[in-house]
Image: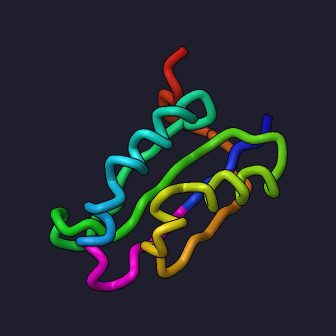
Amino acid sequence: MAQFLINARDKAGALALRMENRPAHLDWAKAHAHRILMAGPVFADDGETFAGSTFVVEFPTLAEAKAWAADDPYAKAGLFEAVEIRPFRWLLGGGKPE
């Protein structure tokens, strides 16, 4: 199975939109935990202000990874200013616990 890095950056001033959709986003991510190797929020330089989301996921194809990312409640709500999805290969680190 191929791995993909998903970097999604929030629109400026979209904290209320993020928080409004956060419960649905977390439920969606938990429902797909078998696909997720790593995930978490990204913060601004202050280390406190939400600035986006990052995932490393496993899918058979790039098209499937893109379709999955588009189904994120955050994406559907229009939270993201930009989303980058790239093929990725895990090289170092603990990775997903088995």
Left or right: 44 as drawn, with respect to 65:
left
Reply yes or no: does residue 8 show up in magenta.
Answer: yes
Q: Nearer the viewer, residue 56 or 20?
A: 20
Which residue is found at the position 73% from the left and 55% from the top? 87
Residue at image position (43%, 73%) is 79
Task: Look at 48% across and 75% down and name the residue there.
Answer: 78
Which of the colour schemes (rainbow, by chain, secondary structure, one colour) is used? rainbow
- Residue 14: give x, y in percent of width and height: 30, 78
Relative to residue 86, is residue 79 depicted above or below? below
Q: Quadrant of residue 51?
A: bottom left
Q: Which residues are magenta?
A: 7-15
Image location (x, y in percent) of residue 11: 39, 81
From the viewer's side, name the closer residue of 12 and 23: 23
* Residue 53 percent coordinates (x, y): 42, 59
Image coordinates of residue 37 in percent, x first then y, are 55, 35
Quarter placement of the N terminus: top right
Looking at the image, which residue is at 57% across and 71% down?
83
Q: Residue furthest top?
A: 98
Vertical arrangement, residue 14 with respect to residue 20, above or below? below
Q: Nearer the viewer, residue 74 or 47?
A: 74
Quarter containing the C terminus: top right
